[in-house]
Image (cartoon, rainbow, N blue to C red):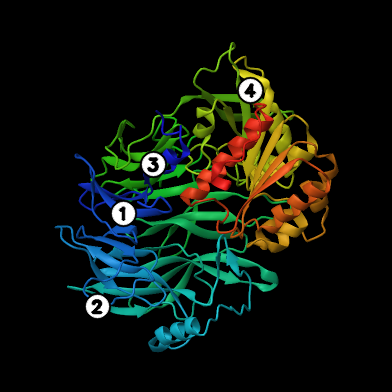
Amino acid sequence: MSAFDDIRDYVAIPRVLSLKLSPDGSRLISVVQALEPDGKSYGTALWAIPVDGEPYRLTRSAKGESAAVFTDAGDVLFTSARPDPTVKDAADEVPALWLLPRAGGEARQIATRPGGIGAARTAGDVVVFASDVLDGEEATEDERRKARKDAGISAILHEGYPVRYWDHDLGPARTRLFAGRLGADRLEDVRELTPDAGEALRDTTFELTPDGSTVIASWRRYLPGGDNRTDLVAIDVATGERRTLLTDEAHDFGGPIAVSPDGTRVACARERITSVDVSVRVELWIADLATGEGRAYAPGLFPTDVAWAPDSSALYLVADHQGRRPVFRVPLAGEHTRLTADDAAYLGVNASADGTYVYALRSNIALAPAPARIDVATGEIADLPSPAPRPEVPGTLTEISATADDGATVRGWLVLPEGASADSPAPFLLWIHGGPVASWNDWQWRWQSWIMAQRGYAVLMPDPCLSTGYGQEMIDRGWGDWGPRTQADLDAIVDVALARDDIDNERVAAMGGSFGGYMANWLAGHTDRYQAIVTHAALWNLDQFAGTTDSSLYWQREFGEPGSERYDRLSPHLAIGKITTPMLVIHGDKDYRVPIGESLRLWWDLQRSDVESKFLYFPDENHWILKPGNVIAWYETVLAFLAQHVLGEEWKRPDSVA
């Protein structure tokens, strides 16, 4: 039996989410997500992974644990909403900061805040953490929060943009940074570092210099007309004094951020401000911490993760590349080189203090994430024992490519089910990635092609224009030309896939989410090639979307002012009269990136046009579908819809949505 036979078995597979290396290099720590006993939600726990031994569980609580980091002494700091066992009738509604001693024993709560504690960083005995704070007197914040709750007030008065982010409302509290020192039992001398931040620390990324003296953080500046820029600032931990380290009206600076071990440099991502004629470009930027002078490194590679070598002479950079996500070594002097030569995607890079190894999570389309050790001298890769054993996939992974009409190469991954052959060709499913600035190169817990392969489908996962890992020109090709240019790329590689004798070119379907959903909608109105189309969290009416998404500014930069030419040329809804392909529309009501109004409008347009269609609606989900029961309902409904229209089976309403 495969873990992909029953979707209930699939959602129960534990998942390794993160990786941190201890200062002495003896063990790694990971946050592992697993299904709760009631099967209705996921919980998290911390696991230790000795570099020369077997993993073992460190924590266990109903509220779970996350955001784990090591102190210099080897203790573990983490956040959890678990109740404090030393306080009678302790409240447990918001995450607090906990310390788990290196020598063992019970974790103890060392800091709390009325608005909870988010990410934390530590160096020496200094700890800096983020917390959401209501404006006003700190001493009365608990009372004011309680009064608001007791009065049943949920209203938020906004005086600027934005007001939402992905799946949560912004405000009324605002993010602040706090600093303290590790004491015998508690975090001592806790003080606010950024009382004047306003909205500048929304979704901030921050790091602490190795001596604990300075916080390096992203800092958002709000401009007229709803515009903003993100700078990098340096905040003195002792005084709270802040200076702007990196600022540029043509670029944003942000995560990933890493400070060199010698405390002299900072590495971060520099992202170009886009416009109708200027495409997105993200590059690795390294700057001097004293002067702010810096430059770009490793041109053409969009940084996903970074870690400094222990001697501060180079960085290890993770970036998309040709359908993989390798680790690159980027020296301060000289050219960058690729460290890992396999087909894997890496994340969570950690360099050992002796410079011998890099540790990271290793995965690919057919390989679930697990810890690995990379020899810096040879590039040799060794998988380490994992807290979550990898499931065996039911099929094979093949790489294919095609030449588009403009001469560009379009490549992708083809998942083939067991038994696919010329005598038994597999039905075909095109799965278009989101983003659009992204790549199919990693294991997907959410968009799982192996569930489809277990049921006999060949799944094509292509990287058309706008995909990362193929140079800036691949992004430039599709900038401001989403539908037509992307469809031409997809058509080219689908032609190659359907020409194979182990794929049935008469039983074909397409699906996608987010930008992939936009393209699914676009294909529905511009081709009759597919017998069924599944569209998830999809853009439909671009003018409507651009004003209701949580980040209107970002899309306006590419499409222009509302009413501009691109809205009419690229909006899928204008082709509603040409749609004849049966469509399954899926959306979560808590999706603020692509608001539910897109699918509500699409659903009505399909209904009034008598297009055969169904609408799978999740009142309590966001851009993704995350709750185990809803994941089951999602896959069962998609599979039933495809079975009806691609396999020719009678429609059977899944029990999960009965």
Instruction: Label 4, secondary structure: give it.
Output: helix
Task: Name the quadrant of the N terminus.
Answer: top left
Residue 219 horizontal/vertical position (percent): 51, 68
Residue 22 horizontal/vertical position (percent): 24, 52
Q: Are marks 3 and 1 in contact (CB under 8 Å)?
A: no
In front: mark 3 or mark 4?
Answer: 3
Q: Are marks 2 and 4 in contact (CB under 8 Å)?
A: no
| CA distance for labels 2 and 3 | 36 Å
Which of marks 4 and 3 precedes in the sequence?
Answer: 3
Neighbor class of circle 1 (other Cα within 10 Å; few <14, some 14-19, many 20+) is many
- As shown in the figure, which amino acid type bears the numbered disc 4? Ala
Q: Which residue is mark 2?
A: 88
In front: mark 3 or mark 1?
Answer: 3
- As shown in the figure, which amino acid type bears the numbered disc 2? Lys
Residue 461 horizontal/vertical position (percent): 58, 33
Which of marks 4 and 1 precedes in the sequence?
Answer: 1
Neighbor class of circle 2 (other Cα within 10 Å; few <14, some 14-19, many 20+) is few
Q: Is residue 476 above or below residue 460?
A: below
Which of marks 3 and 2 precedes in the sequence?
Answer: 3
- As shown in the figure, which amino acid type bears the numbered disc 3? Ile
| CA distance for labels 1 and 4 | 42 Å
Which of marks 1 and 3 precedes in the sequence?
Answer: 3
Q: Which residue is mark 3?
A: 13
| CA distance for labels 1 and 2 | 24 Å
Q: Which residue is mark 4?
A: 497
Q: Look at 31% across and 62% down and name the residue there.
A: 78
